[in-house]
Amino acid sequence: MMKQGHLQALGKRIQELRKDRNLTQERLAERCSLTINYIGKIERGEAQPTLEALFSIATALKSNLSALFTYLDRPLTKDEAKAKIRELLDQL
């Protein structure tokens, strides 16, 4: 199972790609034969998508699967770093 932080980062990346392509959640859901609720949950990091769902999403975004995971290669933004620090402090 993926860690919650990874799920949220994956969801944020999917959302970024979707918005870059001027797609609504509804249109993305139609393109990849998933429900709009499921797309929303993925983007919020509330669902762990299957590999099949990720392939469908990547195809619908006219991208490749690896592009969905590029968040691992980029540094955190200032806001993301602050949120991560708050999350860690809350765990103390």
Image: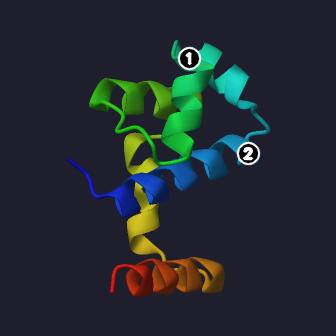
Q: Along the line of sight, which residue is nearer the eye, 6 or 90?
A: 90
Percent coordinates x, y for residue 19 in the rendering: 73, 45
Secondary element at image label 2: helix
| Quadrant (top left/top right/bottom left/bottom right) for the C terminus | bottom left
Which residue is pictured at 56% across the width and 54% down the height?
Answer: 12
Q: Is residue 54 above or below residue 70?
A: above
Query: Are circles 2 and 1 on residues that touch, CB within 8 Å?
Result: no
- What's the image's color scheme? rainbow
Q: Is residue 14 above or below residue 3?
A: above
Which residue is pictured at 41% across the width and 72% down the height?
Answer: 73
Distance, label 2 to label 1, CA atoms, is: 18 Å
Percent coordinates x, y for residue 75 in the rendering: 49, 81
Q: Specify the amino acid type for callout 1.
A: Thr
Circle 1 crowding by C-alpha within 10 Å: few under 14, some 14–19, many from 20: some
In the image, farthest residue toward the left? 1
The residue at which mark 2 appears reads as 19
Q: Along the line of sight, which residue is nearer the eye, 75 or 35?
A: 35
Q: Specify the amino acid type for callout 2.
A: Lys
